[in-house]
Image: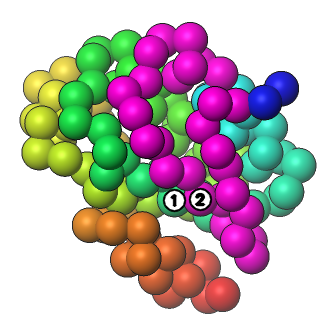
Amino acid sequence: MNSRIPILKLYDYLLISIQWELDDETAIQFQEVLLQRIHETSASGVVIDLTSVDMIDSFIAKVLGDVISMSKLMGVKVVLTGIQPAVAITLVELGIHLQDVETALDLEKGLEILQKDLGD
């Protein structure tokens, strides 16, 4: 299954940069493809970059929270980067709790967090 959202592998990490607002179908497909890629590559970390996402609805917020929880169940550390103010507000207002999820301002800092935390 091909995803409309590219998932790049760099060393033991998967890098995802979401470049547009997600619709429900794309979000579900992204969830399935990411989990499959984690399994196939034995990745130890994932960076999800949301820099280009200006708004998020309740369904997409839930799917994002689910993706993080599912990835963690598979033993993968997830770092979110580039969260815009409106997205942060929406996540908090919707009660999407991202406990123990590291965040960073940009992709580079997200990779640094993975390298520091995972000892790579």
**Residue located 56% across and 51% down the image:** 16
Q: Position of residue 71 (x, y in %)?
A: 62, 44
Q: Which residue corresponds to mark 1?
A: 47
Q: Amino acid at mark 2?
A: Leu
**Separation of residues labelled 1 and 2 (CA atoms):** 5 Å
Colour scheme employed for the rendering of this structure: rainbow
Quadrant where the image shows the N terminus: top right
- Please indicate whether residue 1 sits to the left or right of residue 67 in the image: right
Residues in magenta, as a range: 3-29
Q: Position of residue 100 (x, y in %)?
A: 38, 56
Viewer-proximal residue among 107 and 43: 107
Q: Position of residue 51 (x, y in %)?
A: 31, 51
For residue 52, which quarter of the picture? top left
The answer to whether residue 73 shows anywhere in this view is no
Residue 12: say if magenta.
Answer: yes
**Of callouts 1 and 2, the N-terminal one:** 2
Q: Amino acid at mark 1?
A: Val
How would you rate the neighbour count of disc 2 (Cα within 10 Å): few for under 14, some for 14-19, many for 20 or more? some
Q: Which residue corresponds to mark 2?
A: 15
Q: Position of residue 22 (x, y in %)?
A: 43, 24
* In contact (CB < 8 Å): disc 1 and disc 2: yes
- Please indicate whether residue 38 sits to the left or right of residue 53 in the image: right
Q: Is residue 11 above or below residue 63?
A: below
